Amino acid sequence: MHPKRVPETVFHTRVRNDALAGPNPFEWKEVSSRSVFADRRIVLFALPGAFTPACSESHLPGFEAMYDEFMALGIDDVVCLSVNDAFVMHQWSRQLGIEKVSMLPDGNGNFSEGMGMLVSRSDQGMGHRSWRYSMYVEDGEIRKLFAEPGFQDNPPGVPVQVSDANTLLAWLRSR
């Protein structure tokens, strides 16, 4: 069972600093859950891993393609969360040409654990990962959550069935 509010944690992100020279002009920035969610309407979707098939082929690209439709409904940001580090999240978004969706690294899995969505994927050599879900959050309160069925450790895979952009967008439009 997920909490009624998002868990308070710190995300370790990287932000561009044009004062830095070289091929990696980024510096560390700690971002709290509060700064992501407070006084904002957020669509967040979480997935098992950067560069993995369903995540790369449909889940993230689907939210990127529908980003403007979410914004038209008054959403403040669309956020992709994965238990990956900031470097991996950045390179993955670059490879897929993601320009609108915000990438949020949950490198230690603290947010995913607080959500009750951290699962073991050790059978696939992936360690601990987030279960696949999407949610609408208003000022830190989880108003709707679409979790993929079959929540368990070491699933053979977690297809995108109910946590896709279309499902969440349709729910938001029906409100």
Image (spheres, rainbow, N blue to C red):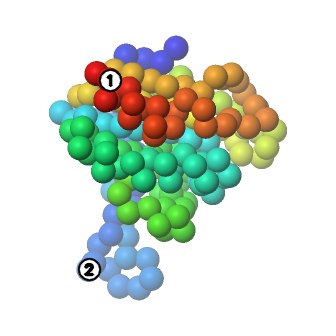
Residue depicted at 38% across the width and 63% down the height:
99
Residue depicted at 56% across the width and 41% down the height:
47
The residues tagged by marks 2 and 1 sit, at their Cα atoms, a distance apart of: 46 Å
Give the residue type at disc 2: Ala
Q: Give the crowd class for mark 2: few <14, some 14-19, many >=20 residues within 10 Å.
A: few
Q: Secondary structure at mark 2?
A: loop
Give the image location of residue 157, x and y in percent.
73, 37
Residue depicted at 18% across the width and 33% down the height:
39
Residue underneath mark 2: 19
Q: Give the crowd class for mark 1: few <14, some 14-19, many >=20 residues within 10 Å.
A: few
Relative placement, left or right, of 76 versus 85 is left
Give the residue type at disc 1: Ser
Looking at the rendered image, the disc whose residue lies closer to the viewer, 2 or 1, is: 1
Q: Which mark is residue 157?
A: none
Q: Quadrant of residue 79?
A: top left
Residue underneath mark 1: 174
Q: Furthest residue to the right?
A: 123
